[in-house]
Image: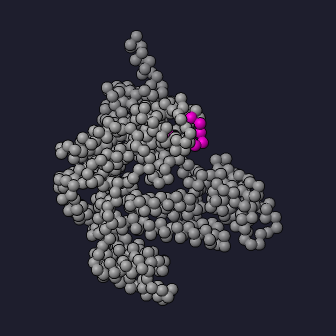
């Protein structure tokens, strides 16, 4: 189930069906349990929250009665467990919007600190969208005060962090109304004054920016009897002098683990980037194949390089902003894309630089157009792109990033396994695990991390349920890159309806199929174009006329197959006819 307390209490099953929690008392009780989901809430606190400082006689019995009603409404999927000191709602913290909000704000703040404003803005915008109104309206005022104050404080901090990220991406005039509204609600926030001054300055309204400082100085003097902080005063002086903030471009991110395998791919990429006729090299492959890590490793060995992460972008028109932000060029942005593009071309016109455009697939058309323009106007620029499909530009050279071969896959597993189990020296089931996971580096790393609590035999035997098993990834990664399911789902969502339907039907072939077999079994006339599209989007592999899916992709697509029983019958009939004909 999914629970919402950032607004009126909302309960929904996994398929989105709403669940009625009952009247005011059950709603307040469930809200109290959700605030500490997964942990025991003492009985005394529940009684205080329901009845205040003067509970009625028999409050304990009344609480037990309310718990019983709540159990019936929630059903066995989300049990309310009894503890010697209280009650506990047995649900994952991620199922509650308030806890998801906190995790996402931490992630966004970390991305901002790491110099990745595009990702920070996307994550924080998604986090703030979880709010549907005032927090915890179903709790009595006395009980809710401290919790509401804490959540509202986090909400304000997240909004300020998101504004900071948008300012880093070139936001200006469009942020001014929002910042003025926030200041009206929080007139003593020096950070908001500073952000409004920077937004006005970026929008070409320096006089208004200086006026905001005077407003801040008067308000702080009248309300608190203090002067503006040194930081706000320094910003005021900087704007008076006509200066701008343009931090140095961050270097390529340092990696936290050893890079394993890919010697042949690294050698090919290095040779291509050294060739003056290969100015656009695109690494293609399925999600989790390690394209980003390979691109960063390849970029380290050459000339000056800049990583531009496009995954957080929800709009392809923001690609120029993301590149300028990655370059550390943040002042003077304007609304129109043509102005931004012109500024980007001017910034790169005379530079020798390798641009690493990471995760282009969801903005592929805009990324392709801009890449073509950059390569045509900036002779010193080279582009190394990663994408689940090609950009489709003349002169583009593709470097497929396949699954890891057995030996480096097992080396990667052992390397990551020793991080959680230092004495681990290998096991006979390790090759089986790597083979079952298609040699995908992300899946192997997630599986190795599970050795902290599982034995290799258990891990190997449970891979039939790989998406549930491999659901705990790096918390610093974007949500769509954190778990095995999220990675495959990201690719699935980029397919159109016909591609998704055919992908689901193809799962009936455990060992791949020819186009003729696909046509006969899946009932798709002339499937070649759809098959080619799935190959281009890294959802299928093709070799000698046979199309096949990686087992991980096949397991995901099988969940979306329509009429699997009918497909199995058609599959059996087709191969029976084939066997009879052969005989």
Q: Which residues are drawn in magenta?
A: 448-456
| Number of numbered markers | 0
Where is residue 69? Give x, y as percent.
Answer: 72, 55
475 is higher (above) or lower (below) than 324: above
Residue that appears at 56% across and 67% down: 151
| Residue 441: quarter of image | top left
Left or right: 352 as drawn, with respect to 515: left
- Left or right: 452, with 346 as reference point: right
Residue visible at 46% across and 34% down in the picture: 410
Looking at the picture, does residue 556 appear above or below residue 384? above
Query: Residue 217: x, y in percent?
Result: 42, 85
- Residue 246: percent from the left, percent from the top? 31, 68
* Res 444 seen here: no
Residue lying at the far top of the rendered structure: 583
Q: Nearer the viewer, residue 114 or 331?
A: 114
- Of all residues, the one furthest to the right in this rendering is 57
Q: Is residue 178 visible?
A: yes
Give the camera-side residue of 189 and 9.
Answer: 189
Location of residue 100 in the rendering, given as x and y in whole percent from the top left corner: 53, 57
Verify whether residue 280 appears in magenta: no
At 31% from the left and 45% from the top, the residue drawn is 298
* Left or right: 333, with 504 as reference point: left
Q: Which residue corresponds to the image point at 31% horizontal and 26% vertical from the top-left?
A: 544
Q: Considering the whole magenta stretch, tell me its main secondary structure.
A: helix
The image quadrant of residue 219 is bottom left
Quarter placement of the C terminus: top left
């Amino acid at each position: 189930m999914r629970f919402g307390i950032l607004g009126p209490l909302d309960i929904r099953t996994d398929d989105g069906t709403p669940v009625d929690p009952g009247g005011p008392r059950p709603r307040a009780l469930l809200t109290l349990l959700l605030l500490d989901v997964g942990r025991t809430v003492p009985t005394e606190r529940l009684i205080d929250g329901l009845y205040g400082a003067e509970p009625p006689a028999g409050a304990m019995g009344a609480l037990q009665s309310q718990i019983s009603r709540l159990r019936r409404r929630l059903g066995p999927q989300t049990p309310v467990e009894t503890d010697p000191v209280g009650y506990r709602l047995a649900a994952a913290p991620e199922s509650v919007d308030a806890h998801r909000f906190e995790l996402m704000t931490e992630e966004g703040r970390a991305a901002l600190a790491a110099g990745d404003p595009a990702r920070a803005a996307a994550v924080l915008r998604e986090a703030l969208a979880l709010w549907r109104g005032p927090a915890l309206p179903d709790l009595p005022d006395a009980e809710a005060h401290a919790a509401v104050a804490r959540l509202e404080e986090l909400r304000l901090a997240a909004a300020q962090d998101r504004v900071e990220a948008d300012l880093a991406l070139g936001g200006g005039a469009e942020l001014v109304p929002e910042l003025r509204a926030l200041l009206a609600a929080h007139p003593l926030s020096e950070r908001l004054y500073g952000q409004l001054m920077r937004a006005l300055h970026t929008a070409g309204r320096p006089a208004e920016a200086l006026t905001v400082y005077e407003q801040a100085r008067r308000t702080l003097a009248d309300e608190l009897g203090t002067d503006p902080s040194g930081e706000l005063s320094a910003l005021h002086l900087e704007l008076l002098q006509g200066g701008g903030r343009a931090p140095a471009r961050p270097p390529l991110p340092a990696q936290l683990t050893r890079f394993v395998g890919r010697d042949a791919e690294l050698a090919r990429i290095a040779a291509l980037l050294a060739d003056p006729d290969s100015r656009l090299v695109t690494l293609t492959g399925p999600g989790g194949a390690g394209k980003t890590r390979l691109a960063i490793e390849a970029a380290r060995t050459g000339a000056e390089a800049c990583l531009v992460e496009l995954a957080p972008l929800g709009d392809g028109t923001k690609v120029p902003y993301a590149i300028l932000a990655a370059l550390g060029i943040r002042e003077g942005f304007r609304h129109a894309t043509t102005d931004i593009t012109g500024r980007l071309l001017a910034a790169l016109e005379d530079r020798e630089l390798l641009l690493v455009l990471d995760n282009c697939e969801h903005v592929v058309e805009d990324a392709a157009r801009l890449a073509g323009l950059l390569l045509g106007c900036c002779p010193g620029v080279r582009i190394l792109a990663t994408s689940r499909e090609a950009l489709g530009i003349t002169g583009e050279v593709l470097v497929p990033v396949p699954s890891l071969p057995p030996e480096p896959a097992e080396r990667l597993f052992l390397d990551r396994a020793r991080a959680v189990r230092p004495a681990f020296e290998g096991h006979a089931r390790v090759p089986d695990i790597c083979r079952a996971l298609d040699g995908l580096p992300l899946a192997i790393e997630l599986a190795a991390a599970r050795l902290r609590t599982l034995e290799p035999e258990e891990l190997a035997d449970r891979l039939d349920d790989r998406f549930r098993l491999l659901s705990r990834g790096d918390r610093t990664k974007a949500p769509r890159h954190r778990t095995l399911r999220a990675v495959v789902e990201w690719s699935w969502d980029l397919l159109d309806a016909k591609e998704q339907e055919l992908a689901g039907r193809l799962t009936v072939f455990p060992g791949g199929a020819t186009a003729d077999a696909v046509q006969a079994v899946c009932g798709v006339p002339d499937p070649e174009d759809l098959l080619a599209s799935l190959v281009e989007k890294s959802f299928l592999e093709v070799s000698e006329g046979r199309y096949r899916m990686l087992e991980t992709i096949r397991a995901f697509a099988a969940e979306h197959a329509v009429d699997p029983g009918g497909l199995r019958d058609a599959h059996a009939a087709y191969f029976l006819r084939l066997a009879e004909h052969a005989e």
